[in-house]
Image: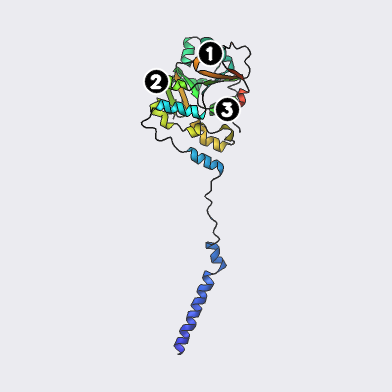
Amino acid sequence: MAAIIALIFLGAIISGIKEIFFSSPEVKTHTQNKPKENKELTIKEKNISVLTKKNDNLFDINKSEYLYKEVVERKGYLIHVTERKNLAGILECKNILSLQNLKKNDIKPAFMTDEISRNLDHRKGFDEYVHLAFDESYPMFSAKLYYLQLNDPAIIKIDPKIITDHEKDILLSDTNSSASLAKTGSINELLSSLDFQIIYFPKDQITNTNIYQNLKKKKQSEILVKEKIPLEYVKEIYVSTAKGLNITDNMKITETDTCKKLRLNF
C-alpha cells in the first residue's frame, strides 16, 4: 500500500514539473512570441522583382515584327539624341548619318561622346551605324547632361517602321554598344536578350540610385542602323528653340525643355 501511495505521489510531482516547464512564460517566448518573418516586398522591390523576368517564347515568330510591335505598343517611337547645332546639317543632307558617313562627307559635328568612346565604336565597327535609344531615360543622356558633355540636346523621334523596313541593316545591343561586355548582333540573334520591362521602366519612378543601378545596364540597350536614317523616318523633333532651323512643311518641330526630358529624377 505504501508503495502504491509513493508511486502516485511521484507521478503527481512529474506531472507538475511538466506543467510548470511547458506553460512557462519564458518557454512560450521562444515559441509563440517568435517574430514572424516578413516576406512582404515593398512596392519598389516588387517592381524590381517583376523586371528581372526574361523575354521568353520568342521562337517561331518574325522577330523584327515582334520588336516593331513592342516599340509601337510601349512607346511609339525610337530616339536619336544630338546637339541642336547638328540639326542644320541633318536637315540639309536629309539624313541622320553615321560617324563614318559624316567623315566621308567632311562634316564635323558637335559630339556628345568623348574620343575614347568614339575610338571604341571605331574598333568594333559601330561608327558605321546610327545609334538609337528606346526611351528618354537611357542613362547616358542624363550622365552627359550632368558632365556638361551635352548642352542643348535635340531629341529626334524615329518611326519604328525602320525596324521592319531595314531589318538587314539593323543590329541590337543588350547594353551600351561600346561597353566591353556588350552583346551585339542581328535582331534574330539578340532579341531575346532585351528586357522591355526594364527598358521602358517609367522614368518618373526612378527616384534613387538603388533602383537606378538595378535598371542601368539593360536600359542602355540600343538599336543600331547601318549608315544613315532618312528624314522620312523622323516623326518629330524636340528642341529648346526652332529659331534658325530650315524646317520643311511636313517636318514636326516642338519647342520644349529637352534637358528636362532627358534627366533622371535624382
The residue type indicated by label 3 comes to Ser
Mark 3 or mark 1: name the one nearer the start of the chain: 1
Residue 232 in percent (x, y) is at 50, 15
Does the residue at mark 3 contact the one at mark 1 (Cβ under 8 Å)?
A: no
Q: Nearer the viewer, residue 48 or 148?
A: 48
Which of the two labelled residues, at mark 3 and mark 2, occupies the earlier sequence position? 3
Q: Residue 118: where, in percent of width, then height?
A: 49, 20
- Residue drawn at x 46%, y 27% is 69
Q: What residue type is disc 1 on? A: Ile
Which residue corresponds to mark 2? Answer: 168
The residue at the far left in this view is: 60
Which mark sits nearer the N-terminus, 2 or 1? 1
- The spot of residue 153 in percent (x, y) is 59, 20
Label 1 element class? helix
Label for residue 128?
Answer: none
Tell me how far mark 2 sits from mark 1, CA to CA.
23 Å
* Residue found 49% across the figure and 27% down from its top: 72
Q: Which residue is mark 3?
A: 142
Q: Which residue is mark 1?
A: 90
Report the front residue among 217 and 116.
217
What is the C-alpha distance between the residues marked 3 and 1?
Answer: 23 Å
Tell me the crowding category of disc 3: few under 14, some 14 to 19, or many 20 or more residues within 10 angstroms, Cα based.
many
Label 3 – label 2 distance at C-alpha: 31 Å
